[in-house]
Amino acid sequence: MPERAGVHERLKAHVRDEGGFGLVEVLIALTILVIGLVAVSGLSLASADQALIASWRTHQSSAAQMVLEDIQEGGWWSAVSGSDTATVAGHDFPVTINVSNVTPRVKQITIVVAAAGVVDTAMYGTRIYKPLPLPDPPPAP
């Protein structure tokens, strides 16, 4: 074992006692942490912007749906071109309605909801069909 004790003493003489972290290591770790936090905060801001845009688009879609429901409630004959304002969630959306006859029984309805908030103008389209007349009832026996 004397040989082994000599090796141990020589190693002990060459190895310094370096307990803990140095200043350079701490600065590198903090820099990496800050870069990561900046990236995460940028993602959360982008996510918040996209959520706001989605909310406005939902409001636009709801405005168009309200106008279309009014047209459908009035029936085939109430489908006329014009302008209106739809209020959704406390926001007024200017709406333009364009109606064109595709055939004598089919009307093409285009609803344009003006830009509002952070979103562009949105266009929605549908067709409505003129109801067929009911057949005459069978003769009574």
Image: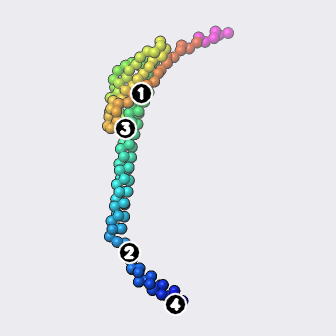
Residue 63 sits above or below residue 78 on the image: below
**Secondary structure under badge 4?**
helix
In the rendered image, residue 51, in percent from the top left (x then y), is placed at 39, 43
Sequence-wise, the earlier of marks 4 and 1 is: 4
Sequence-wise, the earlier of marks 4 and 2 is: 4
What residue lies at 35% left-to-right and 50% top-to-bottom?
42
Closest to the observer, 92 or 113: 113
Residue 112 sits above or below residue 3 on the image: above
Instruction: Verify CB contact (< 8 Å) between mark 3 and mark 2.
Output: no
Residue type at mark 4: give it: Pro
| Residue farthest to the front, as pictured | 3
Question: Residues under labels 4 and 1: Cα distance?
Answer: 92 Å
Question: Residues under labels 4 and 3: Cα distance?
Answer: 83 Å
Q: Which mark is on residue 56? A: 3
Residue 131 sits above or below residue 45 on the image: above
Q: Nearer the viewer, mark 3 or mark 2?
A: 2
Q: Which residues are magenta?
A: 136-141
Q: Mark 2: few, some, or many residues within 10 Å (few <14, many ≥20)?
A: few
Instruction: Verify CB contact (< 8 Å) between mark 4 and mark 1.
Output: no
What residue lies at 33% left-to-right and 30% top-to-bottom?
114
Q: Mark 1: few, some, or many residues within 10 Å (few <14, many ≥20)?
A: some
Residue type at mark 1: give it: Tyr
- Residue 16 in which image quadrant: bottom left
Closest to the observer, 131 or 119: 119
In the rendered image, residue 110, in percent from the top left (x then y), is placed at 40, 23
Q: Main secondary structure of the magenta part?
A: loop
In the rendered image, residue 34, in percent from the top left (x then y), is placed at 34, 59
In the rendered image, residue 129, in percent from the top left (x then y), is placed at 49, 18
Residue type at mark 3: give it: Trp
Can residue 93 be seen by looking at this rendering? no
Residue type at mark 2: give it: Gly
Quadrant in the picture for the C terminus: top right
